Structures are given as C-alpha cells and as structure tokens.
Amino acid sequence: MSAQVRGCAPLGETILGRRIESHVSYLVRHRPLAAPALRLVCFPHAGGGANFFRDWHRHLEPSVDVVAVRYPGRENRIGEPLIPTMDALAPQIAEALLAESPVPTVFLGHSMGAAVAYETLLRLEAAGADHVTRLCVSGRALVARPAAPAAARTDEELIAAVTSLGGPHVQIWQDPDLRELFLPIVRNDFHLIDTYRRREESPLLRAGVMALTGDRDPRVTAGAQEWSTVTTGAFTSHVFEGDHFYLVPHAEQVARLAVARQDA
C-alpha cells in the first residue's frame, strides 16, 4: 500500500473500497430523524471513528437522534488531514453542532472522546448554547498523564499501548495494510491527547456531568470523581464490569443511562 493512503489521497479516489468525498460532515447519523425529542452526540476514542457507535440508535427510543462525531483523517474522511491538537479540533466540532437544531442534548465521549466532548461543550456554552444538559465522560479521568509521549514511542510500543486497552478490533494490527492505514491515525490521536491539558481557568459547565468507568480500568476509576469539580450542575458516577472498553458489552445499558431523565 502506498503512503498516499495516509490522508493525502486526492478527493474522489477510492481507498480500501471507500470513495473519498469532499465536504464530509463531522456529524454522522445512522437513523436520521426529522423532529427528534432528544439528541445523543457520541465522541469516539483515540484511533476510533463514528462507526463505533453505528448501532447505538437501536438501544434507544425512536425519538432520540443519535449522532456520532467523525474526526478527519479516517473512515470516509480519510482524504482529509488529521488534526493533531485539541485547540484545532474542538472548535470545528463545536461549529458543526451549533448549526444543529437546539433540542435537548447529551454528550457522551469515550476515552480521548471524553476530553474532546468536554472541550467542545465549553465552546458551546461560551457561545450561549444551553440545550446540552449532560456530559457523559467514559473511560477517562479528569487529569490524565501519559506514560510517554506518542512521538517517543516506536511503532511497536504504540501498538502495544493500544492493544493493552483491549477493544473490539485489536486484530487489525496483524494485517500489514490495515496497520499502515491505522497507525498514523492512532499516533496522531495519542499525540493530541498526550499533549492536551485542561486549562485550570476554564469556566465551570452549566450542564451536569456523569462519569462512567469499568471496574478493571483502575487508573481511570480512581480519577473519575474529579469530574465533579468541572460543573455547577449535578454529578453522578457509575462503574460497570469490564476493562477500558467496558461499554462494548454494555452498550445498551450505557446508552439508556446517558439519556435517562436526571430525576429518574
């Protein structure tokens, strides 16, 4: 496979059976709704994509609009450059979400996606939006420190770091073509989250916060309660059986919990 695969492919070409199109949205819907009563916006983990949440609409009422965020440089946005910093990524996602109808909305981000969701919500609230009522942060402590910068890791060390977390597609690293395709994406995302630091002067969120972790993800579970300090709203936390990717076997329960009424 040529190096052109890595986000430099001209728009309109086909990569691994996928046609690369221009002007692809950040927001993906696998069940579009004309008039939703509630919206759940899902932010993927490092190396992940919108397809991680492709079946989540099946777990929720037909009135819930399930939207997955698709970061550049992957899936049908593979022809676009990767974005290596939070300060570049979060404003673009916020801009896309501000263009949506302001129905009651819940954000759910997993791992890196939890930090992206938080930074995106800060920007929405700063713009005056008040329709996001809850931020669900899954598989991430408020303050996380990397073991080593992604740039300092060899390819094998980076793959070892990813596979140690588990997840549904660890077998892709055994395929040379998929390895060549996904390794730059993972390196970019690890760089983004390794270099990200929450600003201490960030305003408190008005939306409530819900922290979700697996009981075999001890580094995250120990720091999950710290998310209570970023909001003036309600804070709750829930621990599920499982590792860093506990939400794969518990997808239905997590989806329903995320959108449950706060007084339920």
Image: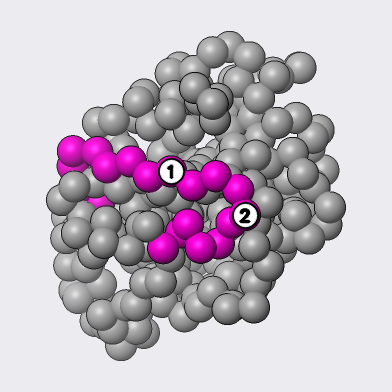
31 in relation to 25, above or below: above
Residue 70 visible here: no
Which residue corresponds to the image point at 60% horizontal and 20% vertical from the top-left? 64
Give coordinates of residue 124: x percent, y percent: 74, 54
Amino acid at circle 2: Thr
Camera-side residue of 221 and 27: 221
Which residue corresponds to the image point at 68% horizontal and 51% vertical from the top-left? 206
118 in relation to 61, above or below: below
Give coordinates of residue 59: x percent, y percent: 43, 18
Disc tally is 2
246 in relation to 121, above or below: above
Which residue corresponds to the image point at 34% horizontal and 83% vertical from the top-left? 149
Alpha carbon distance from label 1 to label 2 = 13 Å
Left or right of 210? Residue 174 is left
Camera-side residue of 78 and 153: 153
Q: Which residues are magenta?
A: 226-244
Q: Which residue is mark 2?
A: 232
Q: Is residue 197 magenta?
A: no
Q: Which residue is mark 1?
A: 236
- Which quadrant holds residue 237? top left
Camera-side residue of 199 and 111: 199
Give coordinates of residue 87: x percent, y percent: 64, 73
Q: Secondary structure at mark 2?
A: loop
Q: Are marks 1 and 2 in contact (CB under 8 Å)?
A: no
Which residue corresponds to the image point at 78% horizontal and 60% vertical from the top-left? 126
Location of the N terminus by quadrant is bottom left
- How crowded is the residue under tag 1: few (<14 C-alpha within 10 Å), some, or many (20+)? some
Q: Is residue 230 magenta?
A: yes
Q: Secondary structure at mark 1?
A: strand
Residue 199 visible here: yes
- Which quadrant holds residue 82? bottom right
